[in-house]
Image (tube, rainbow, N blue to C red):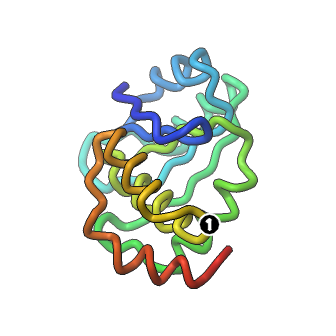
Amino acid sequence: MDIRKIDDTISVTPQISVEDVAEAANLGFKTLVANRPDQEEPGQPLMADIETAAREHGLDWVFMPVQSGHITDDDVNRFAPMIRDAEKPVLAFCRSGTRCTVLWALSAARNTPAREIFTKARNAGYDISGLAPRMAQQACEKG
């Protein structure tokens, strides 16, 4: 796995396998979040199989599929309370980790200065500078 720590509460990674779930549990993650729809591309593991492995390894499981490149305000509105209330630390995954990072950034923008969010994302290897206008809009939401 290519785990990229955003902060002490959340890390993101590209698509994981069923076998990766045990490693995630051994690394101390408590919640596994899937932001990738089933069958987004051929050969991708079924989310039900990853869910079964997560539960077998004592991880909380959240399946919150989001369409790549089309994250809506409703998606952010679902992600924000989930990430706030999830048992930490959280490991979120999608195809590349970007979708998870964008969801985190937009939800965090409601309570965290943009500069801090940009820095955390950049340190994890994600350039989300193009999100500045949406983050400003989310900052007005104050979740």
**Residue nearest the observer in this picture, 51 or 70:** 70
Q: Is residue 80 left or right of residue 17?
A: right
Q: 10 Å neighbourhood of mark 1: few (<14), some, or many (≥20)?
A: some
Residue 127: x and y, percent?
26, 54
Q: What amino acid type should be assigned to the residue bearing mark 1? A: Asn
**Residue 2, located in which quarter of the rendered image?**
top left
Residue 85: x and y, percent?
75, 53
> Residue at point 49% right, 38% down?
11
Q: Is residue 13 left or right of residue 84?
A: left
Q: Establish if 26 lies above or below 63.
A: above
Image quadrant in which the C terminus is located: bottom right
Residue 30: x and y, percent?
68, 32
> Residue at point 43% right, 73% down?
135
Q: Is residue 94 left or right of residue 137?
A: left
**Residue 57, located in which quarter of the rendered image?**
top right
The secondary element bearing badge 1 is classed as: loop
Q: Establish if 90 lies above or below 107.
A: above
- Read off the residue under disc 1: 111
> Residue at point 24% right, 47% down?
42
Image quadrant in which the N terminus is located: top left
**Residue nearest the observer in this picture, 130 or 88:** 130
Q: Establish if 43 lies above or below 23.
A: below
Residue 138: x and y, percent?
52, 78
